[in-house]
Image (spheres, rainbow, N blue to C red):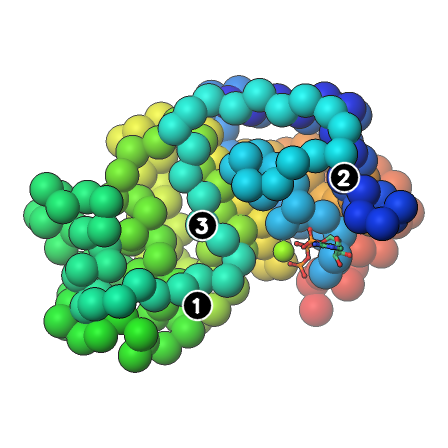
Amino acid sequence: MFEVRNLKKVYRERVVLEIEHLSLPQGETLALAGANGSGKTTLLRILAGNLKPTEGETRTAPPVLCLPQRCYAFRGTVLDNVLLGARDKKDEALALLEETELLALKDKKAASLSGGELQKLAACRLLVSPCKLLLLDEPTSACDAAGTKLVLSLLSRYREKTGCTVVLSTHTPAVATQAANRLVILNNGKIEADGDPQTVLRAPESDWAKEFIAGWRI
Ligand SMILES: Nc1ncnc2c1ncn2[C@@H]1O[C@H](COP(=O)(O)OP(=O)(O)OP(=O)(O)O)[C@@H](O)[C@H]1O
Ligand SMILES: [Mg+2]
């Protein structure tokens, strides 16, 4: 689970995040949406403990795992990368690579992967370990439709196995509706819509949300 109260992040007098209260029970999945610069990464980094809020409190259930918006490869092969921090889990690592269709690339240098392949690898590297709170910053942004499906099904299996809480950000409505049971839309750092994804998309509460969602459907 996680809970934030009276959260504020200010950069040089500019408020980029301001959330009075947001909480998510254990086992639920929240999708975060909103335009570029609306505060999604800022919120995820605060939840991950990688960024200090200017004001406010956060409560999270450790261990917390976080997939950053910009994926990177460590030195070594694709398989080496999944085994980082999970040396004794070779069978699980190979199963994850198979599930994401990366098994044929397991002995390739990780640095040579394409953007989408690298993103799938980063997901495998993370999901080889269990956690209570999983934070994913645009986890399928570099994936094609097939890759997106693979990552979402991997996520769903991981969630069933671990019972973890998930917060993921996305610019893709289908990812929000398929992966999450709740959708929050941020507008300039503030919560503009919050609810069941289908309901938020079908019947947005505010004029702003209506316009945002209309644009989102392009
Ligand atoms: N270190 C920083 N210093 C100053 N401003 C920052 C810093 N980090 C982020 N910001 C600003 O905070 C705002 C929110 O950024 P954030 O990365 O959270 O947006 P986002 O919703 O994740 O956007 P995107 O969809 O592009 O990933 C942006 O306007 C950004 O320019
Ligand atoms: Mg971001």
Q: Amino acid at mark 2?
A: Lys
* Residue 210 numbered mark, or none: none
At 41% across and 39% down in the image, what residue appears?
A: 65
Left or right: 51 as drawn, with respect to 137: right
Q: Amino acid at mark 3?
A: Leu
Q: Nearer the viewer, residue 54 or 80?
A: 54
Q: Is residue 198 visible?
A: no
Circle 2 or circle 3, nearest the eye:
2
Whole-number angstrom distance, CA of label 2 to CA of label 3: 21 Å
Picture layout, residue 60 above or below residue 103? above
In this figure, what is the number of numbered marks?
A: 3
The quadrant where ligand 2 appears is bottom right
* Residue 143 numbered mark, or none: 1
Instruction: Report if the beta carbon of the residue with label 2 is closer than 8 angstroms to ligand 1.
Output: yes
Mark 1 or 3 closer to N-term? 3
* Residue 9 numbered mark, or none: 2
Instruction: Report if the beta carbon of the residue with label 1 is closer than 8 angstroms to ligand 1.
Output: no
